[in-house]
Structure formats: structure tokens, C-alpha cells
Amino acid sequence: MTLKESFVKIGIHDLEVATSHYVLDLDTLAERHDIDPKKFSIGLGQDTFSMPAPDEDIVTMAAEAAHTLLERHDASKIRQVLFATESSIDQSKAAGVYLHELLGLPANVRSVELKQACYSGTAALQMAVNAIARNPEEQVLVITSDVARYALDSGGEPTQGAGSVAMLISADPNLIEIEPGSGLHTTDVNDFWRPNDSTTPFVDGQLSLDAYLGATTAAWDDLLARRELGLEDIHRFLHHQPFTKMARKQLAALAEHTGTELSDDLIEESMSYNRALGNTYTASLYFALTAQLHNNSDLAGKRLGFFSYGSGAVAEFFTGVVQDNYQDHIYPQHVAKQLDNRVALTYDEYRELHSDFAATSETFTTTKTTNAPFRLSGVTEHQRRYEAQ
């Protein structure tokens, strides 16, 4: 048997998403700040953003997405839970361990948490693919879950958001085969960071934009040095989207960098969910993937190009091939329900909720607010407590 004959396709077998209880319309924010709403809808490419209730966090959103996903699969095949986030709830205990308990997974499972700003979801995906290559009969649950929270009245305020994407990685995937060979780039840059003693990040906006564009084009160059691949071989591009206008900027930068004309049509279908959710950090790229699959009925056999970026900064460009029967394994109605069920906030309610954010390990009890299947009930003796409902 040749190496090519023994190769097993590995990739994203299935995925599900979740978001939070509340939503703020950016027109509301614009009106109270006396800003032209087009600055948000066109300038940023954003319409609304999700915001968690006091009894929601990265674990509850992840649990909802993963629970819906696993209702369609045999959880006994899962050997790893890789939880990627940059809004961690603990400096030691992995969010994946809390998730493992809520989902009722077997004890013989590896559960860890990964961090590198918005990039770590891609690191988790690649780690999962490598694990399946070694043990093709196993599966890995990859979680991307984040809450993007910025200071009131700051430049980043309209780019807040919350959401989670849960992905089941396996051999012979139903959705996306992840192809071998990535382009990588790491450089030490302070474009965006959140110290341990701060509940909101520090951002150098122009440096962040420059770092994002530079790192992702550098990752593209690294990919070309390792694979025989051209832009013409890629049918659609997917980008990390802290705001959707950023994807347009990156596509334009790639076009200029390569001297190739690239139409916005190559990314248009990937933006709908991120426009409505806001920034979801690690989950952003994979909400873009979800939107692309849901909005395009002609992707079978087509190659997707993934641009992943995490401030600080790490970038990766990799590719995946959409599988022939992918439309039989997507659930756009689930996303529509998530978005439609959010409760709209008034401006004053939003300000109060933002100000009441509890970044403490002191004992407290949350008011039951979310209608999601899992909730944070509070903290007792410095221990977070979760419950199913």
C-alpha cells in the first residue's frame, strides 16, 4: 500500500454554535453617543452584539453548543476536549474540565484549555487533526468560546460580543477535510493584551491592524514556500473577524501583496453571523466557516482558505476541502434560533449590566436569567458552580 492509498481524510465532522441571552443593537449605542450609525454598520461592518446574562459565561455557552452537537453522535468515541478561549475563568483549572462534567463525558478523556488570543481555536483544531492521524478511530471535541468585553465609552466598545462554536474532529469528516500543510507566523508585538489584574483589554488600534495584516500575509508566504498552491486554487476565503470590515481589509491586503485581483464575493457569505454576534475571539473564524456553509449551496469539493490570527501575535493560513454531502449535515435553523431568541437591551440596561460584571471569586449567587440548558449559579468558597436546567 502506498502512502497516498493509506491516507485518511481528517477534519471537521460536525459543528454547533451558541451565543448569549442578551443583544444590543448598535443603532442604540450610536444614538446615545451621538454617532452616525453608519460608522458601525458600514465602517465596522457590524449591526448588533451579543452580551451574556449574569448567569452565563464561556462554559455555559460552550456546554450548550457541545450538548446540541453530541446529541447527534456517540460521545464514547471522544478522547480529548480541547477548549480554546482568551476570556478564561480560572488561572489554573481548565474550562474544559467544567465542560466535561456538564456534558457527562467519560472519565477516560483528556481535557485542557488553550490560549493565544483569538488564534488558539486553530491550534486546538490542528492538535485534534494530528491526534486523529495517530488514532483514526477516536474523536476530539474542539471548543472555541469567548466573551469580548471592552471598557464603556472606549474605541472597542462597539466591537464587543459573545459566542461559542463546538466542533467534532474525526476521520472521514462530513463537513471539512483539513488539508496537511500550513503557513505560520509568530512575532512579539503588543497590539492587544489583557493583564491578570484587568477585566478589559488594552488595545493599540493601528498597531493591531498593521500586525493583523502583516502576520496573515506572512503566513500566506510561508504556506507558498511549503505547498504548491495558488490563490486560484482557493474558492472562498475565511478570516478572523473582530469586526467584519477587517476581513475586507485583509482580503485587499492579500490582493495587493500578491498582485492578484480578489473580489469581496470571495468572503461575503462568511460575514452574516459575525455581523450579528460581534467579536467572538477564538470562535470568530469558525462562525465565519459556519456562515459560509449555511449561505452557500455550491461548495461541495471546493477548497476554503482559512486566515487565523491572534494578537500578540500568531497567525496561520491553512486550507480545507468541503465534503460532497455537507448540506446534509448543517443546521442553519439552529443558528437562527440562537440569534432570534436573544433579548434586546435598552441602552441603560446595557450600561447597568456591563457595570455589574462580577470578576470576583468571592461568594455570590446569580439570578436565574438565561433560558439556555446550562447556567452559572454562582461562586461558593472561591469555586464556580454550574447547573443544568
Image: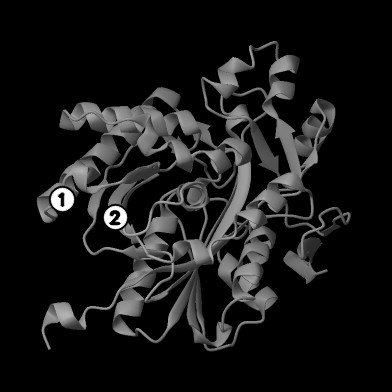
In the rendering, at what x and y percent does residue 322 appear?
37, 60
Give the answer, above or below, for where 315 lies relative to 103: above
How many numbered discs, if any? 2
Q: Which mark is residue 229?
A: 1
Name the image quarter holding the C terminus: bottom right
In the rendering, at what x and y percent does residue 107 appear?
58, 88
- Circle 2 residue: 319
Q: Is residue 93 visible?
A: no
Q: For numbered disc 1, what is the local secondary structure? A: loop
Q: Disc 1 to disc 2, how far (Cα)?
A: 10 Å
In the rendering, at what x and y percent does residue 50 appear?
68, 41
* Few, some or many residues within 10 Å of mark 2 (<14, 14–19, 20+): many
Look at 66% across and 58% down and name the residue there. 61
Kind of residue at badge 2: Thr
Q: For numbered disc 2, what is the local secondary structure? A: strand
Give the answer, above or below, for where 83 lies relative to 47: below
Relative to 358, 146 lies left or right = left
* Marks 1 and 2 close (CB-CB < 8 Å): yes
Viewer-side residue, 351 vs 131: 131
